Structures are given as C-alpha cells and as structure tokens.
Image (cartoon, rainbow, N blue to C red):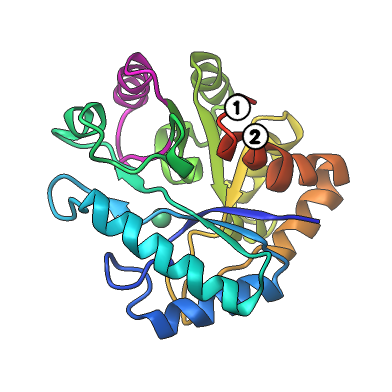
Amino acid sequence: MRCFDIHTHILPGVDDGSDSMDTTRELLKLQLKEGVTDIIATSHYDTRRNRQDYDHIMELTREVQEEAKKLDSELKIYSGAEILYSRGVLDDIKDGKVPMIAGTECCLVEFYPSQSFNEIEEALNNIIMLGKTPIIAHLERYQCFIGKIDLVRDVVKLGAYVQINSNSFLEGMFSKNARFIKKLLVNDLIHFVGSDCHDMVSRKPQMEKTYKYIAKVAGEDVAERITVTNPEKIVSGEYL
Ligand SMILES: [Fe+2]
C-alpha cells in the first residue's frame, strides 16, 4: 500500500530542514521504515527571507528523486513548497515563481501563528481567486482555530483543505490541541497529514504511529483516505 507524506523539509541546504544530501538520505531511509512511499518536498518559501529560486528547487527535487530511487525503486519525490503568506507572495504565485504541489494548481500555505481568522480567510480567498487550491499547513498551529470547529468548516466551505502535522495527533489526551484534532478527525475535517520533518534529531518523520492512531480513532478507511487517496488525487491534479 502507498502512503504519502505531503509536508517535508527533505531538500538539502535550502531552508531549516535537511542540511546535506547525507541527512536527506537518512530521512528517506526513515520514511521508508515508517511505510512512506510518496513524499512531497515542501521547502519554506518566504518572500522576506527565503525566496527560493524555482529552477533550483526543481533541480534539487530531481536530485533527491535519484537518491530515493537508489534506496527503493518505488519511492517517489514530488516538488512543492510551504508558502508563508506574506507581502508579495500573491504576485510570485501569479508569476509562476512558487513551486505548486507536483506542478498542479494546489499549494501548501502557512500563516503566522497569531494571525486572525479574518486575515487567514482573506488570504485563502486571494489564493483561490488566482485559481489555486490552498492546503492550510498545520492548521493546529493557528490559535484562532483552536476549539472552533465552525471556523474550520468555514474555510473548508471556502475551498481550502486542512493538513495536520503527524506528531500533533499524538500529544495525548491532556493536550487541548490533540483533543481538538480528534474532534476534527471524527467530523471529517482533516484532508491530509504531513510529518513536517526537518532533521533526524528533534523533527523526525513519524507517520506510522499516526496512521495507526487515525485508524483506531476514525477507522481504517479514514486513515487510508487521508494518507493515500486524498494525496493521490492532489498529485494527479484532481479535486477531493
Ligand atoms: Fe513545514
């Protein structure tokens, strides 16, 4: 069975993720051990500090794909970016300077943790107006959503998808965030899970435990939809 990780910082030397091809190789090996077969490389794209060069990202993605093939012929790497919604980013998207997920019209977008719901809603609207489909990166990080399931419903109705980080599911019953994530899960408001892995020390890929947790809480069919069917559709350019 396939399993996607749609949020990773595995490209070497471009952001605060992998620092070398050696680290990238170790991350890929661990992903394989965790059962991951398809990885979207989503390096930070930040108009203030980290405006990645499109061609360079594509070239690096190809290089990592070659390394991945040596480890396992089935392991696939797709291009992408984690786009910080900041000044000038809409123009960059419009000008085709920002890597979309697997070259489709879908993109992974992050916000500042303290941003208001109105600002996030307006930003999503602006992206949708460009003909793009935004996936909200680690929605659990934005304070405005926590405990407010109706606001999550609102952005989904608007046309956005929701991604949650794999380790956030596993914070335990005393975590307010984890309880909220569970609520989103059983209400079918989570479309994707991503490890948001950066390195082999403190931010490792961790997909297997999360898959099992989702299957236990919401059923095997939901776990499969979030980790396989939905991302398969996205990389094929389909809507969910
Ligand atoms: Fe990230």
Q: Where the C terminus falls, by quadrant?
A: top right
Does the CB distance between marks 1 and 2 fall below 8 Å?
Answer: yes
Residue name at image x 55 percent, y 14 percent: 157
Three-letter code for the amino acid on which mark 1 is drawn:
Glu
Q: Ligand 1 closer than 8 Å to the CB at disc 1?
A: no
Residue 110 image position (x, y, % from top left): 36, 42
Q: Mark 1: few, some, or many residues within 10 Å (few <14, many ≥20)?
A: few
Q: Position of residue 184 (x, y in %)?
A: 66, 35
Residue 170, by quadrant, is bottom right
| Front-most of residues 140 and 80 | 80
In-image side of 59 versus 173 (left or right): left
Which percent across, then down, holds residue 121? 37, 21
Quarter-wise, where is residue 12 in the image? bottom left
| Mark positioned earlier in the residue sequence (1 or 2) | 2
Q: Which residues are magenta?
A: 107-132
- What residue would you read off at disc 2? 233
SS at badge 1: loop
Name the quadrant where ligand 1 sits: bottom left
Number of marks: 2
In percent of width and height, residue 120 lies at 34, 27
Residue at the disc numbered 1 = 238
Question: Mark 2 falls on what kind of element?
Answer: helix
